[in-house]
Image: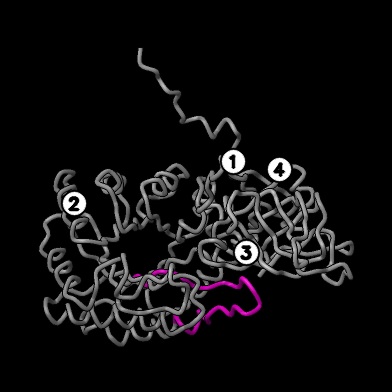
Amino acid sequence: MTPDSLFADDAHHLWIGGMRIADLASQYGTPLYVMDETTMKNRIESYLSLLSNLAVPTKLFYAGKAFLCTAMAQWLRRWPVGLDVVSGGELYTALAGGFDPEAIIFHGNVKTVEEIRYAIAAGVRYIVVDSLAELAIIESEGARLDRQVQILLRLTPGIDAHTHAFIRTGQFDSKFGFGMADGISDQAVSQALSSDHIELAGFHAHVGSQILEEDPFLANAQSLLDYAQLWHRRSGWWPTVLDIGGGFGVRYGPADEPPELTHIFHRIAEAMIAMTPKGCAVPELAIEPGRSIVGEAGVSLYRVGATKFVPGGKQYVAVDGGMGDNIRPALYQASYRAAVDGRSLDDTASAKVTVAGRYCESGDILLADVILPTPEVHDILVTYVTGAYNYSMASNYNRVPRPAVVLVSEGTSQVWVERESWQDLTRLDRLHRSEV
C-alpha cells in the first residue's frame, strides 16, 4: 500500500527514495506527484520473472494510460517490455521518448484516420481493432501506404468483473470491442482473414480494472481460446498471440487483496498448451499491466491551507490540490490512505476529518471521514497509491496548473514533468479580434 522505499524516521518524518518528503515539498512545491523508482523497478522485474517461468511464449506490455510521459517511455527501454498506448498523443509521447515502435500496441475504441495513419507509418507492432469501421480504415490506409498491418481484434466475452461499473469493460454491454454473442465478432474475423492488407495475429480482451479476483482473468483467457478453436475448425486459422489485457488490482487499502498472479498465469499457460491444435504453435501470451506497476510507486504531496468545523462538529481539512490532480474519488468513489508528515497516528490529537480540495465543486473531496493526526495549516499531507491515473487524468479545471512529477531513487530526485505555470494556461489562447 506504500512505495517499497518509504519509511518514517523516529520523528515520524516520511522518507521516499532516500529523500525526505518535507524536502521534496520545499524544493518542488505542492501539490506534487512523487514516483519511487525502486517500486516500479521491483514490479516490472517481478512480472518478467513470473512470465519467464511459464511454458508458453510471453510478452509484457506496460499500459501507458496509467502513467506516461517521455521520461517514462525512455525509462522503460531498459527492460524487454512493450508499451500499450491508446491515442495518437500517447504514441507520439512514446516515440518522443525513443521507444521502439515495433514493441508498441495501439489501442482505443475510436481511432481517427490521422491516428491510424500515424500508427501504420510508425510501424507499431499491433493495432487493436475495435469496430468494423476501423477495420475498413486500416485496410484502406494499409493499401495506400502499401503496408501489411498486423492487428488484434478486441473481443467482449461477456465477463462481468466485480469492480466499479465505470471500469468494467468485458461485459456484452460495453463500448469496447466486438461482441461474441451477436455474430459481430464473426463478421470481423471473416473480414480480417480475407483482407489484402491486414494480418490477423490474434485476439485481445480486457475485462476491467482494479480486479481483485482470479476467476475473471481465467474466464477471459478461456473464452479467447474457445473462440480461437472455433475459427481453427472453420478455417484452419490459429492465433500467434492471445492478449488478456490487464486490470490486475493493487492495495489501495487494507481490505484490498490482489489476486495471486503466479497461479493465474500458470493455469492460463496450461490451458493454452492443452487447447492448441496439433501442428500449431502455442500462441504468445500477452499481458498489459499498468496500475500494478506504477500505482503503489506514487504518492501525492499536498500542503494544508485551512481547517474548519461545520455545524454538527464535522472537521474539514482543505489542501492546495484536489480533483484537478486526482479525479478518481469524484469519478469512481475511490478511497485512499493518507498520512501527515511528522505526525503519528498514535498522537492523542488524532481525529476523524474530511480532506477537501481547492476546486469549486462540493464533490471535490479527496478523503472522506478518515482518522488522521489532526492536521494544521502548512502541514504536508501525503496520499498513497497515486502513481496510476492521477497524473494521466489531471486537468486544468478552475484554470489551476497541473503539478510536477518527480522521480526519486537512492537519495536523488529528478523532474520528469515540470510544474505548469499560469503562463502555460494561456499559451494556446487567442485574443478576440473585433470586427472593424
Compare residues 377 and 410 and report the one nearer the observer. 377
Which of marks 1 and 3 precedes in the sequence?
3
Which of marks 1 and 4 precedes in the sequence?
4
Counting other residues with Cα less than 10 Å from the Cα at mark 4, is it few (<14), some (14-19), or many (20 or more)?
Answer: some
**Label 1 element class:** loop
Which quarter of the figure has residue 6?
bottom right
Residue 146 shown left or right of residue 325 in the figure: left
Which of marks 4 and 2 precedes in the sequence?
4
Residue 280 percent location from the top left of the image: 22, 78
Residue type, numbered disc 4: Tyr
Chain part drawn in magenta: 243-265
**Label 4 element class:** helix
Residue 320 percent location from the top left of the image: 69, 48
Q: CA distance from mark 2 to mark 4?
A: 46 Å
Which quarter of the figure has residue 252?
bottom right
Query: Residue at coordinates 28% horizontally, 85% vertically from top-left?
Result: 275
Counting other residues with Cα less than 10 Å from the Cα at mark 1, is it few (<14), some (14-19), or many (20 or more)?
Answer: many
Residue 246 highlighted magenta (yes or no): yes
Which residue carries the number 3 mark? 385
**Label 3 element class:** loop
Which residue carries the number 4 mark? 28
Compare residues 36 and 271 and report the one nearer the observer. 36
Viewer-side label of 1, 2: 1
Counting other residues with Cα less than 10 Å from the Cα at mark 3, is it few (<14), some (14-19), or many (20 or more)?
Answer: many
